[in-house]
Image (cartoon, rainbow, N blue to C red):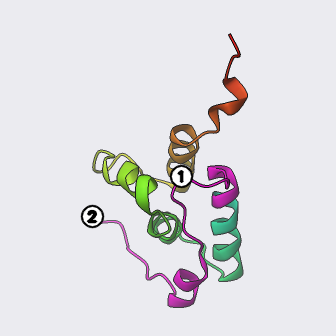
Amino acid sequence: MLAQRHDIPISALKSIPDFTGETSISPLEHIQEVANVYNIHGITEDDVAIRLLASSLKGKALQWYRGLAHGSITNWDGLGAGLCKHFEDKSDHLSLQ
């Protein structure tokens, strides 16, 4: 049986900021912004939250998302964790050696 696919409210789509992975906004900050949007719009379905976050990805972030294996993202936490891992701020880990 196929999982039910819920509609994304247009007003929610228009409310989310873009994430490219190339700005000063961290992936975690972006995820929190998207979570705020889906909370404001009363979105409770995981499939909608995932598609809402995915639709905010542009540039390098979208390229990363499109490169994921089909079916590898099954929930909000998985997409968030993957996004954070791939676009984490590595400046804290740099050495001056």
Q: Which residue is mark 2?
A: 1
The x and y percentages for residue 24 are: 67, 53
Mark 2 surroundings within 10 Å by alpha-carbon count, few (fewer than 14), some (14 through 19), many (20 or more): few
Quadrant assignment, res 17? bottom right
Quadrant assignment, res 59? bottom left
Query: Which residues are drawn in magenta?
Result: 1-30
Query: Extreme bottom residue here?
Result: 11
Check the image and report above or below for 71 versus 39. above
At horizontal 50% and vertical 89% (from top left) the residue drawn is 10
At horizontal 50% and vertical 71% (from top left) the residue drawn is 52
Check the image and report above or below for 54 versus 38. above
The x and y percentages for residue 69 are: 29, 45
Which of the image's four quarters has the N terminus? bottom left
The x and y percentages for residue 26 are: 66, 50
> What secondary structure is marked by label 2?
loop
> What secondary structure is marked by label 1?
loop
Q: Name which residue type carries label 2.
A: Met
Alpha-carbon distance for marks 1 and 2? 36 Å
* Left or right: 87 in relation to 51: right
Which of the image's four quarters has the C terminus? top right
Residue 8: mark in rendering: none
65 in magenta? no
Q: Name which residue type carries label 1.
A: Gly
Do the residues bearing badges 1 and 2 touch, measured as CB atoms within 8 Å? no
Which is more foreground, mark 1 or mark 2?
Answer: 1
Query: Extreme front residue here?
Result: 97
The x and y percentages for residue 76 are: 54, 56
Residue 21: mark in rendering: 1
At horizontal 48% and vertical 81% (from top left) the residue drawn is 8
Q: Earlier in the sequence, mark 1 or mark 2?
A: 2
Q: Main secondary structure of the magenta part?
A: loop
* Left or right: 26 in relation to 21: right
